[in-house]
Each structure stands twice: as C-alpha cells, then as structure tokens.
Amino acid sequence: MRPRLAAWAFAAPLVAYLLVCYAYPLYTNVNLSVRGYTVRTFVHGGAPFVGFENYAAVLADPTFQKAVVNTVLFTAVSLVFQYTIGFALAVFFARDFPLSATLRALFLVPWLLPLIVSASTWAWLLNSESGLINALLGTKIHWLTSPEWSLVSVTIANIWIGVPFNLVVLYSGLRTIPPEVYEASSLDGASGWQTFRHVTFPMLRPVSAITLLLGLVYTLKVFDLIWIMTRGGPSGSSTTLATWSYELGFGSMLPRFGPSAAVGNVLILVSLVAGLLYIRAQERA
C-alpha cells in the first residue's frame, strides 16, 4: 500500500489542478449553454433549464455559417503556410553556418511578443491611409476595412506569429535524426531531394503531426489578434467562432451567455476530435 499511496500523493496536485482549472470551467461552460441565462440570473442564479435551445439558436443564426467558413479558411491557410515556411526555415537552419543561432533566435521574436503588440503593429502596417504595406506597394488597399481583404489581413498576421513555433519544433525534430541515416542515403546514391522525400520527411512525421495538432488548437481559439485588428468586421467578413462567441457574451448591451457558451463548446468539441484523431493515428503508427 505504501508505494500506491506515495503514487497518489504525487498525482494529487496534478489531479487537483486539472479539476480546478479544466474540469470545473468546462462544467460551467456546459451548464451555461443549456440554461437561459440573463444578466440578472447570471449574478443571482436561478436560470431556467432550456436544453439544446441555445445550440438550436446558434445553428439557426445566419452568422454561424459565415463564422464556420471563416474559421475553416483562417485555420487551414494559417496551418499550411506556418508549417511550410517553418519547415523550410528548419531545413535551412539545420545546416550549421556562422550566426545561425543568432538568426534563429531573431526568428523567435514574433512568437515572444505579446499578441496585443503584434496585432497593433500589423494594424498599423496594413492601415489603408498611412500603412507601410500600401506605401511599399504604391497602391491603396483597404486591408482592414474591406470585406474582401479583412480575413486575408488577419490570416497574414497569424501566419507571421505562428512560423517561429513551427520552426523551433521542426528544427528540434531534424536534430534528432541520426547522421548515420544520411550517410547511408548518400552511399546509396540518393540525391538531395530523394533524401528529403524518403528519409527526412518520413522520419519527421511524428513531430509534424504534433506540430500541426498544436497549431490547429491554437489557431481555432485565436481571438485577440482578430479583435484588435478588425473586431470581426466589416460586416462579419473576418468573424470566426472565437470572436463570435465573445461578441455574443460580452460585445453587446444585451449579452447572450447561453449561445456564447454553446459556440465555445463547439470549438472545444472540434479540438477534442482533433486530439482523438491524433491519438488514434499514433496508435496505428
């Protein structure tokens, strides 16, 4: 019994942390989504049970379809470019050369900056009147106030922020590949592209999978970047599920806590499914 009690004693702080910081907030959010909360009942209690009415209201709202499409586009494009650029930079820095460590450290700056600083910087760069991007292009594109460009603008900013994370993780994965594998590939007469395609990329699949999974979970919940740059506008053209959830709950004079929690639960469900698919893929590997 003594080893078992010791094991539970070591596990108790972690279990308590998970219950307080994850299980309880999740329960609270689910409870919000199945009750008809108002400002009064939110403070004093007594909200009636409404079942799945909040979910039905969210699904019937015209904003839902637009938010889903924007979320899918924002997430998919961000992941593709973050991973591709991060992979290319990781391969580049895998070759040791003078000042490589310094340059690699500089690439971490976008990831280390507070998001409010990054978002404000990109809002200034993409300003249609005095922005640096329009000045360099010699044109006047309404990046943040045009329905055609607002989602593109926040996606570009998110890609810039996410590239360093992909670089760090993929670079670490590249460093774990044994040099003997490359020596054997060279002795077999494989070209650089063949070595990358048949050796480097396959051996990096586990690292790539976790990188994409973490990127997916992070990108789904991006809120502050979009809210600071465009506030989800104009006309909902850059609204995602994360920004819509906030707008329903806190962005108006008449907050709708139930529908806001329902949208949040949809995001949680998508992240959970992605995590389960990753675990299943790892078990098969």
Image (spheres, rainbow, N blue to C red):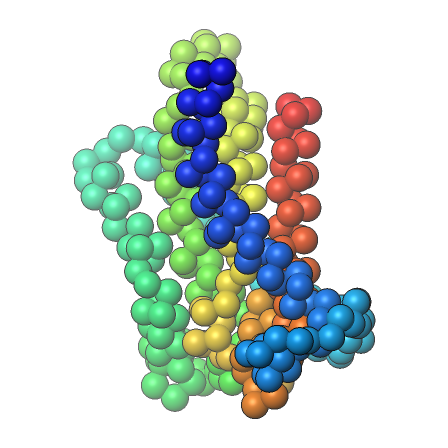
Depth order, front residue of 131/219: 219
Side of 22 where 45 appears, left or right: right
Q: Which residue: 43% across, 76% down?
A: 228
| Residue ranking furthest to the front | 1
Question: Is residue 13 something that shows in the picture?
Answer: yes
Question: Is residue 148 something that shows in the picture?
Answer: no
Depth order, front residue of 196/38: 38
Residue 10: image x %, image y %?
Answer: 41, 29
Q: Which residue: 46% across, 23% down?
A: 5
Question: Where is 214 relative to 71, above or below?
Answer: above
Residue 241: image x %, image y %?
Answer: 62, 67
> Which quadrant holds residue 12?
top left
Residue 209: image x %, image y %?
Answer: 56, 37
The quadrant of the picture occupied by the C terminus is: top right
Question: Where is 101 relative to 235, above or below?
Answer: above
> Which quadrant holds residue 87?
top left
Question: Where is 57 relative to 204, above or below?
Answer: below
Residue 147: image x %, image y %?
Answer: 60, 81
Q: Which residue: 38% across, 35% down?
A: 171
Question: Where is 161 relative to 282, above or below?
Answer: below
> Which quadrant holds residue 62?
bottom right
Q: Which residue: 77% across, 75% down?
A: 57
Depth order, front residue of 119/218: 218
